[in-house]
Every structure is written in C-alpha cells, then in structure tokens.
Image (cartoon, grey):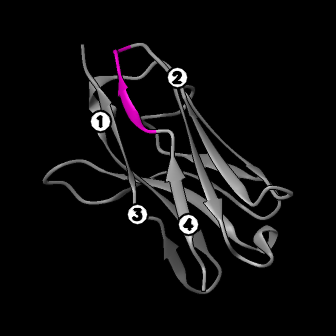
C-alpha cells in the first residue's frame, strides 16, 4: 500500500521560507511522477509544482521563481522549497504521486501571516 507523509508546514511571516518534505512508501519511487498541490479554504485543490521521473519540473505561475520542487530517489522523498512566502500562499499543501493512479498524503498546513 502506497503512503505519502508530508512534513514541514507551519506558521511563517511574509517574506519567510519553509521546506516541505514528503516521504513515500512506494517500492520503486523513481518511476512515479510527484507533485505538490494546495487547497485554501473554500477553494479547489490546485497544482503548485510537479517533477517527473526524469527530473523535469513545472510550476504554477503564482509560485514561479519562489518555489522549487526536487526529489531524492535514494530517500524516496520529494521536497518543496518555498521562499518569499506571501499571505496568499496560505493553504493545506498535499503531496501527490502518480503512475496511472493518484496517491495523496494527508496534507500539511502552511500559514503565512504577520
């Protein structure tokens, strides 16, 4: 059974940084495309960043230049480095793994507020 466990969320001031981690239990992590999504209260869940099995990345326009997604296949972990955080980045952030089927973590809260 695939499990994704996020960590690293919390409260940060505007302009600050956080790094989210997602530990995955897939037996062959490297063959999964991985992504981070976020969902703010009353809004739909949106893609933040994706990294493919080959390491290609893409980002939502709202986070380009501020967020960086990366993966460590040896550790079965995907990361999201978030810099220059803004109040509008406040949301629950979800880790996603995809290979013909979507797997989701339980989410981690990120709150950007002074």
The quarter of the displayed image where residue 98 is located: bottom right
Q: Of tags 2 and 3, which is closer to the observer?
A: 3
Mark 2, secondary structure of its residue: loop
First along the sequence among labels 3 and 1:
1
Quarter of the picture containing the C terminus is top left
Q: Of tags 4 and 2, which is closer to the observer?
A: 4
Q: What separation in Å lies between label 2 and label 3 (alpha carbons)? A: 23 Å
**Dot 2: within a 10 Å radius of its alpha carbon, few (fewer than 14), some, or many (20 or more) residues?**
some
First along the sequence among labels 2 and 3:
2
**Dot 4: within a 10 Å radius of its alpha carbon, few (fewer than 14), some, or many (20 or more) residues?**
many
100 or 78: nearer the viewer: 78
Q: What separation in Å lies between label 2 and label 1 (alpha carbons)? A: 13 Å
**Dot 1: within a 10 Å radius of its alpha carbon, few (fewer than 14), some, or many (20 or more) residues?**
many
31 or 110: nearer the viewer: 110
Mark 1, secondary structure of its residue: loop
Disc 2 target residue: 83
Q: What separation in Å lies between label 3 and label 4 (alpha carbons)? A: 8 Å
Residue 92, given in percent of the width and then of the height, sits at 33, 49
Disc 4 target residue: 4
First along the sequence among labels 4 and 1:
4
Residue 76, given in percent of the width and then of the height, sits at 75, 61
Mark 3, secondary structure of its residue: loop
Q: Is residue 2 above or below residue 48?
A: below
Residue 106 numbered mark, or none: 3
Disc 1 target residue: 90
**Dot 3: within a 10 Å radius of its alpha carbon, few (fewer than 14), some, or many (20 or more) residues?**
some
Task: Please report the bounds of the magenta region as a residue range.
Answer: 9-14
Q: In this image, 29 relative to 19: left or right?
A: right
- Asked if disc 2 and disc 1 are in contact, CB closer than 8 Å, the reply is no
Q: Residue at x 17, y 49 (%)?
A: 41
Q: Is residue 70 above or below residue 23?
A: above
Q: What separation in Å lies between label 4 and label 2 (alpha carbons)? A: 23 Å
């Amino acid at each position: 059974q695939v499990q994704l466990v996020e960590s690293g969320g919390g409260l940060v001031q505007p302009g600050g940084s956080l790094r989210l981690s997602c530990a995955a239990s897939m037996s062959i992590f490297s063959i999964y495309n991985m992504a981070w999504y976020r969902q703010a209260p009353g809004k739909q869940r949106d893609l933040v960043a994706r990294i493919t099995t080959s390491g290609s990345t893409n980002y939502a326009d709202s986070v380009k230049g501020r967020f960086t997604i990366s993966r460590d296949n040896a550790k079965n972990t995907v990361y999201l480095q978030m810099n220059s955080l803004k109040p509008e980045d406040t949301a629950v952030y979800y880790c996603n793994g995809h290979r013909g089927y979507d797997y989701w973590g339980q989410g981690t809260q990120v709150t950007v507020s002074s």
